[in-house]
Amino acid sequence: MTVMDGPEITGYVERVRAALADLPPEVRNELTEDLAEHLAEVAAEGEGSLVERLGEPEAYAEELRTAAGAGVPVAAPNLDRRLAATMVGLRTRLRAADRRAGPLLGHATASDFLRPLRPAWWLFRGYLVAMLITVMTTSSPGLLPRLGGSSLAGLLLLTVCVAGSLWLGRRTPTLSPWRRRAVGLSTGLLALFALVGFVDLDQRRDGDGYYYEPSSAETPYIRDVFVYDGQGRLVPGARLFDQDGNPIRLGDPYCTDGTGVQVEQEKPVLPTYPYCPSAAPFRFEAVPAAPAPTGPTPVPTGPTVPTEAPTGAPAPTPAPTAPTAPVPTPPAAPSVPASPGAGVAPAPPVPDGVAPPVPAPTSPS
Amino acid sequence: VDTTQLLKGVLDLAVLAVLRDEDGYGYDILRRLRVAGLEEVGDASVYGTLRRLFSAGLLTTYVVPSESGPHRKYYSLNAAGRDQLARSGKLWRSFATTMDGLLDDRGMAA
């Protein structure tokens, strides 16, 4: 005589009780309160599993129900039974879908295709657990696990979680039904967490830019500042202050000159902009005081021109000019800021200080 | 009509009968019934019947510890059970006699 180990009997009793779920609780308890002991006796009397010797728990429950005179399932099915019926129908439909989807994936069933992928899911699950711990312990989590702000601890956490997930994945089929259900439930919650996390991440990336708004000197997106005056001329050595008179520090005073060599400016107490005049995005050549015959043509019109120009279409060029006329040139030539008196410089495309000066036609024709 | 159908009506009586002379635990009772010839009887039927007879107050139970296996819950007839056995037994005999007569009249030897 051998004593069966607990889980088999417990699982069997659970399933019998589930099949009797429609009975009044006191009747059900009366019927099954010492079922486990009875099954232990049965198990001790012979060989083979309980299911082999007694049949499926559901069939056992039906026989028990009849023998105990507890009546057949009530005519009007209660919620439990309806739920059970729904589950059975759902499972049947899932199996059918499984078989139908199989050939599309080159397998008999879709689950045949998915089964070998399970270890990959276990790996990912470990990562998700690590991320869950990160999110719970870190104020601004990223994509990599971190523990107490340390990436190294985060790496360790990731390793532990992945190893644990793999171990659990291999062991899950041997767990008792209750534990298996618990694993399934927590896996579902984890998947939900992943979904929420990724949607959140995606929104932060595409969102209103709140998180990446350039607002301070630390922001890496502004490297230099170019000030143009009302005539569209680059202002060298400009200084910026805020409303309190504090200098505004933007960018970093490093400069790559034309040869690609980094030129380090001394870090001034009071920064002057631009750091790299040669890197100005727009450049307007100083035109000789005596304009060429075609001179007046480039930008005779006023404010409306530059606002249209950014579209890059050659059309907005207002005056019918010769193709050689546009003055903006690539920023290769060294900037020659016009002296204050050189009011003849003909190229001020921006009459007001708001919009940046824009080279009107970009087509090289 | 198969044996299972017939059993439903008389399993109570059968269980009471095998407990008349000797107490027994669930699996033991099942074995006695099978040895006696009721081979189709199922464990769940016997267990369910025992539960029902017990809650009807016809049986008493006691647990016998075991060193080698699980504890066993023994069922025994109490006075009400013996009374029930006597009445049901009488009913069965008259019923069986009626059935025998019916079958004999039609020339079907038992």
Image: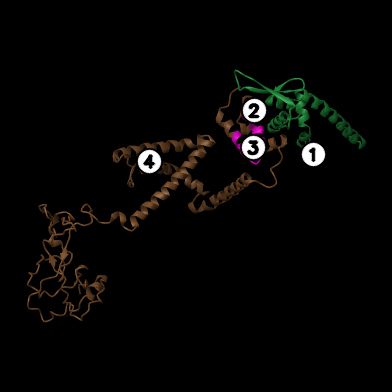
Task: Classify mark 2: helix, strand or loop.
Answer: helix
- Was residue A151 drawn as part of the magenta stretch in this picture? no
- The residue mark sitting in front, 3 or 1, is 3
- Residue depicted at 58% across the width and 32% down the height: A10
- Chain for colour brown: A
Give whichever of discs 4 and 3 has the lower sequence position.
3
**On screen, residue B75 above or below A292:** above
**Mark 1: which amino acid?**
Val
Query: Badge 1: how crowded within 10 Å, few (<14), some, or many (20+)?
Result: few
| Residue A99 spot, x, y in % from top left | 55, 50
For label 4, the residue is A133
For label 2, the residue is A38
Measure how far apart labels 3 and 1 are at the Cα level.
34 Å
Task: Classify mark 4: helix, strand or loop.
Answer: helix
Q: Chain of mark 2?
A: A
**Mark 2: which amino acid?**
His
Residue B96 visible to the viewer? yes
- Residue depicted at 9% across the width and 69% down the height: A338
Measure how far apart labels 4 and 3 are at the Cα level.
41 Å
Measure how far apart labels 2 and 1 are at the Cα level.
30 Å
Q: Chain of mark 1?
A: B
Q: Chain of mark 3?
A: A
Query: Badge 3: how crowded within 10 Å, few (<14), some, or many (20+)?
Result: few
For label 3, the residue is A25
Which image quadrant for residue A286? Answer: bottom left
**Mark 3: which amino acid?**
Pro
